[in-house]
Amino acid sequence: MIRSLGFIIGTTLMYSTPLIFAALGGVISERSGVINIGLEGMLAFGAFTGASVGYFTGNPWIGFIAGGLASGLIGLIHAIVSVTFHGDQVVSGIAINFIGPGLAIFLSRKLFSGAAMTIPVANKIPKFLSGVFPENSFMENVFKQDWTTVIAFLTAILMWFVLYKTVLGLRIMAVGENPEAADTLGISVRKIRYGAVITSGVLAGLGGASMSLAVASNFFPTLISGQGFIALAAMIFGKWKPHGALGACLIFGLAQALVVYLGGTTIEVSTDLLNMLPYVMTLVILLGVVGSANAPAADGQPYEKE
């Protein structure tokens, strides 16, 4: 029983990691007043780039960083459309959700002899506290995590500190709540929003790379399959706060961990029902929370200095 509990906790942390990166990306973008529903596409492109660079270089850390930078470029495009040209942020995000996976599969076919999936990397992201605890014990199941999981939690703490304890964080939130007032105080709305949206892309890309270099060992078309939309739900459920999004991601990660655990037991539960569990939970949470959650006041509103 204790061992099973450790397995569920450890699997929850593993599956929560990509969601935490992506949800934090959504938080920083929308806190600055730019809607980013393109997390799914950014995750997919980051996963492909991470796996490809990790395969060709033989170094998963270079692949991990490359995944973040690649999706950071997509974030830059979203910033240009949203901030400079005042384009519809929702439409731009939808376009990214089509372009990201499509471009990943196109490039995969070009680089890997026509295959829609990359060749597995030789080295995955290493484990934290590997070999410290007895094999298959409760402690090992809980604490032997990928380094990306540790980085995701540290990123959540860092974002909380930056947003609530630094001048930069206060400026980001001021721009997201009232860009006109922030502008009169000498804050550059454009620079803040550009920085936040690009950071959002980088974080989503790291989430995708953590999926293809730690959870799995390569990229394939169904690897992400809705993780970006679940991360969006976690951001809303967490009320656009880093610690709230972190908690919500753990809940969604638990749903996926239960799918894995129940699938490996003698308990007879339909596979289709198990696979639907995370998405059903997403719908239920959104139906129950979206009405009482308030986004930043200027979220989605273009701003032009007069």
Image (tube, helix red, strand yellow):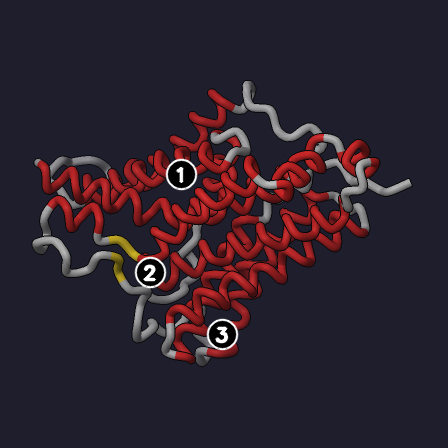
Q: Are marks 2 and 1 in contact (CB under 8 Å)?
A: no
Q: Are marks 1 and 3 in contact (CB under 8 Å)?
A: no
In the picture, measured across the screen, residue 106 lies left or right of residue 267, that is right
What percent of the width, then of the height, locates residue 70?
A: 56, 65
Circle nearer the viewer, 3 or 2: 2
Residue 298 visible somewhere in the drawing? yes
Q: Which residue is drawn at 18% across and 44% down?
A: 7
Tell me the amino acid under the disc marked 3: Arg
Image quadrant occupied by the N terminus: top left
Secondary structure under badge 1?
helix
Q: Mark 2 points at which residue?
A: 214
Nearer-N-terminus badge (2/1): 2
Pointer 3 local density, CA inside 10 Å: few below 14, some 14–19, many at least 20:
some
Image quadrant occupied by the C terminus: top right
Q: Which residue is drawn at 49% across and 35% down?
A: 233
The answer to whether residue 288 is above or below residue 145 is: above
Task: Please name whichever residue, 16 or 263, is drawn nearer the observer in this view of the structure.
Answer: 16
Pointer 1 local density, CA inside 10 Å: few below 14, some 14–19, many at least 20:
many
What percent of the width, then of the height, locates residue 13?
A: 30, 45
In the picture, measured across the screen, residue 190 lies left or right of residue 57, that is right
- Per the model, the C-alpha gap separating discs 1 and 3 is 32 Å
Secondary structure under badge 2?
helix
Tell me the amino acid under the disc marked 2: Ala
Secondary structure under badge 3?
helix
Q: Residue at x 66, y 52 (%)?
A: 195
Q: Residue 249 carries which label?
A: 1
Q: Find residue 187 and report its image quarter.
A: top right
Q: Find residue 304 and report its image quarter.
A: top right
Q: Which mark is residue 109?
A: 3
